[in-house]
Image (cartoon, rainbow, N blue to C red):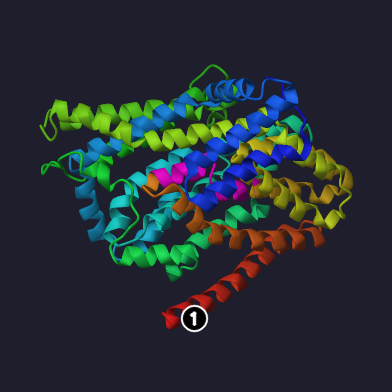
Amino acid sequence: MDPVNVGILSILPPIIAIALALLTKEVISSLIIGILSGTLIYSIASGLNPIIGTVETTFNLMTGRMDVGIILFLCLLGALVVVTGMAGGSRAYGRWAASKIKGKRSAMLATGALGILIFIDDYFNCLTVGTVMKPVTDKYGISRSKLSYIIDATAAPICIIAPISSWAAAVGSNIAATGMYESELSAFIATIPFNLYAILSLVMVAFLCISKLDFGPMRKAELKAAKGDLGAVDTNIESEYEVSSKGTIWDMLVPVIALIVFSVLEMLYTGGLWGDDPAYHSLAAAFGNCSPTPSLIVGGFAALVVAFVMYIPRKVVSFRDFMNGITIGVKSMVPACIILTLAWTISGVCRELLMTGEYVSGIVAASALPAWTIPAIVFAIAAFLSFSMGTAWGTFGILIPIIVPVCAQIAPELTIVALSATLAGSVFGDHCSPISDTTILSSTGAGCVHMEHVSTQLPYALTVAVCCFLGYIVSGLCGGNPWITLGAGLAIFAVAMVIMLKLGNREVKKA
């Protein structure tokens, strides 16, 4: 299927899908309508039959875009969650963690800290943090919406500023393609102080956890949680099996640790740490060269094997129940797999059929903007593109080869700032988008209704984004000074939080 240039119509499918999802709170039908609108536009523009061409194009694209590896890892993780729950490990861990973590604030901070510690890959982060922390956050009445926000607001933001991560590798490959820098790793590290969205998102999580401030839809979700309605969608799964009374905290911790250890070791192996090429004989190089998805599959399978060896000989779980638990766990991941498949498909409609990225980036390249506005405008464009396509990687993959050379010509002193603004905007758009795989996996890991997660986190993400936009304006005016840029971003964020605290206190008094 050859792409076609349809101009402004290229942004119509994601706008339709996202608008319907936000209005109806039903993501699957919204994605299907968005996909069909895009393939219909493509069929008409390509001279195909409007009906047959639309259907054939849709399913051809869907089969081509489906990431079977991620779906397999989701199923393995779902199975692991159920069998550890069946063994009583999750219940025992919840009791133990509740005795060590005292209070709601500590539980939220522990969740955020774990999200920051798992910086290797965002998929791995979203699902592991949710699995580990749900028993603790449930114990202290933290809504699943809040849990999924903390997961989502730490996953991609920490990965995009961690030199050793799958994201750093993806960014580095795009930087290398520009031919502008001798070392893509050095260029990536130079962007870190300017990545205001990633830094301020992490600060926002810490502030919300410490202050326990909530506003907008999240406040309503937290008030419901205080009354016992956590907004969980995975409680019905737990009713499908009996929980063993023999389980201990190790029955949960050991399989989860095995998942982490085997996944990391496999990443290093696929990255060439122990291979013949000396260029990859370092942790940073190996992680940059690794294959994350196959590594996660190996880790998930190894964790299930470890659980089997732990549970069956001790008769914590019978063989029949263990295998039944795998079936229940896989079944629990079907909705997430459907949403992910549809999200990948609509992303393919934009990237591979309608050239959405090329259309938007072409507008940027052709515009005659004052040099000092470049970082802020690039941030906004990257955010729009990432939000529309549901992919941060696809967004900076399109924009970096355009932004870096153009900025080097117009304002070379702002090149690193513009590069960082591209990454920041890509993460922001991906963070907010209901069709983003990271957003979907965050709600899946937390056991939260997907559109509930999207609507509750949107005001928080937008608040941080506005602070970033203003910070990038300051950065353009000061010629890209990292200290002034970061200081301005933090100062603007502090003012925003003071305003939010006052508004929150007014809401409490009214209530």
Q: Is residue 439 magenta?
A: yes
How many numbered tags mark residues here?
Answer: 1
Q: Quadrant of the C terminus?
A: bottom left
| Tag 1 residue | 506
Left or right of 65? Residue 195 is: right
Estimate the x, y position of residue 233 in percent, counting from the top left: 33, 48
Left or right of 286? Residue 246 is: left
Q: Is residue 173 magenta?
A: no
Estimate the x, y position of residue 182 in percent, counting from the top left: 75, 34
Identify which residue, 489 or 163, lies in the foreground. 489
Residue at image coords 23%, 32%: 325
Residue 220 vertical placement versus 199 (above, below): below
Which residue type carries mark 1?
A: Arg
Query: Can see residue 183?
Result: no
Residue at image coords 55%, 32%: 344
Identify which residue, 364 or 314, lies in the foreground. 364
Q: Quadrant of the N terminus?
A: top right
Residue 157 vertical placement versus 291 (above, below): below
Left or right of 405? Residue 118 is: left
Residue at image coords 58%, 24%: 55
> Looking at the rendering, which quadrant does residue 197 occupy?
bottom right
Local SS, label 1: helix
Instruction: Please rate how many residues cluster around mark 1, counting C-alpha atoms within 10 Å: few if below 14, some from 14 to 19, many from 20.
Output: few
Q: Residues in magenta?
A: 426-444
Estimate the x, y position of residue 207 in percent, counting from the top left: 49, 66
Estimate the x, y position of residue 128 in percent, counting from the top left: 38, 42
Residue at image coords 86%, 47%: 367
Residue 156 vertical placement versus 97 (above, below): above
What predominant SS class does the magenta segment belong to?
helix
> Looking at the rendering, which quadrant does residue 170 occupy?
top right
Left or right of 323? Residue 299 is: right
